Image (cartoon, helix red, strand yellow):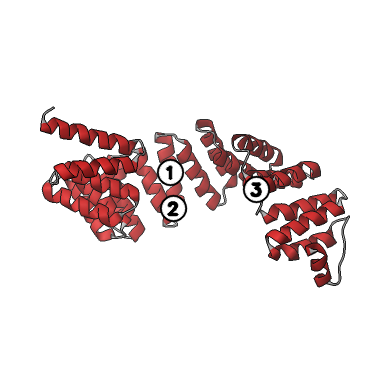
Amino acid sequence: MAPDQDAQSGLKAAFARLESGDVEGAAVLCRRLLAERPRDPALCQLAAVIALRRGDAPEAGRWAAKAIELRPGYAPSLMVAGRAAHAAGDARAATDFFRAAMRLAPDRAEAAFMACVVLLEAGDPAVQALLDHCLETFPDDAPGWTEIGLALRKAGRLEAALVAMRRASRIGPSAQRHRICAAILGELGRKVEAVEALRAALAIGPDFETGFALGRTLREVGDSRAARGALEQAIARDPRSGKGWFALGLVAQDSRDWPGAADAYRKALACEPTLAEAAVNLGTVLQETGDLDGARLAYREAIRIRPDTFGRIAQALAAAPAGEVWLNLQALRQSLEA
């Protein structure tokens, strides 16, 4: 194989490893290739991308600068340099790199959207003109509008973030985009709409976290039956999730299903033995069934896990029909810790 062909083959192999998630394998291959061709701009750019994947922004910036030095006026290298500067917190340099890439490749949506992201994060009023440009030039770029939505959310501009994320979701429906819409709606207090967004996410890509979020949100809007169903389906996908069983226990407790709640809290503790809240709630539920001895054992476990649960336990013991009122709280603590 000719030297150039060999280099191209090695470069493709390194990129393939990177795309498959094998960052270290790509790094090893890239170093080997750079030892043979230290002034290859494509290899320098690859080294910068690898450094970004590793979270090493300064290293990424150095390799990107070398790639630009060896191949000036190449938009992809400028984009990598911009992302490296952005990761390093240098908003001015990042904006300059992204704007330079825009001038060289005006049809590249990524450059315009990333420039918007940086300006949004910096609170720069110049962002509005750039947003208008993106809306006019790249109205159907789902990844770009996703980036804008995330940046707006980070900046606290929730209504605008929702508009951007809903645009991205319409253009390119995905479970992740619907989940982000749901999270923003939740932050806005629009829980019913958040439920619909989570259901749309589940329809595309059912997973535990989405089902868990749906169950919790349904509980918040007062639909206990639907919440229970959503949580049971989520737990079926990850039966070792302590938080899943705990959330199911809360829903069962809301419905006064004491046996169901007790079972869920016990399973939550089996999955996550340090979940003190599950032990406290188990004790409360057992009191409701009249099992005071079982409740005291649960409370004892809660205090062992986290001593600051004692105040809640003292209140719970006094409040339930089958309970105890202790005037001497120190004696109560000692009896539970014995």
Q: Residue under circle 1?
A: 165
Disc ID at residue 153:
2
Element under disc 3: helix
Residue 177, position as x, y percentages in the image: 45, 40
Residue 21, position as x, y percentages in the image: 36, 39
Amino acid type, mark 3: Glu
Mark 2 touches mark 1? (CB < 8 Å):
yes
Element under disc 1: helix
Disc ID at residue 112:
none
Gap between marks 2 and 1 measured at Cα: 10 Å
Q: Nearer the viewer, residue 93 or 308?
A: 308
Element under disc 2: helix
Mark 3 touches mark 1? (CB < 8 Å):
no
Q: Residue under circle 3?
A: 220
Gap between marks 3 and 1 measured at Cα: 23 Å
As drawn, is 55 to the left or to the right of 240?
left
Quadrant housing residue 165: top left
| First in residue order: circle 3 vs circle 1 | 1
Residue 228, position as x, y percentages in the image: 69, 39
Amino acid type, mark 1: Met
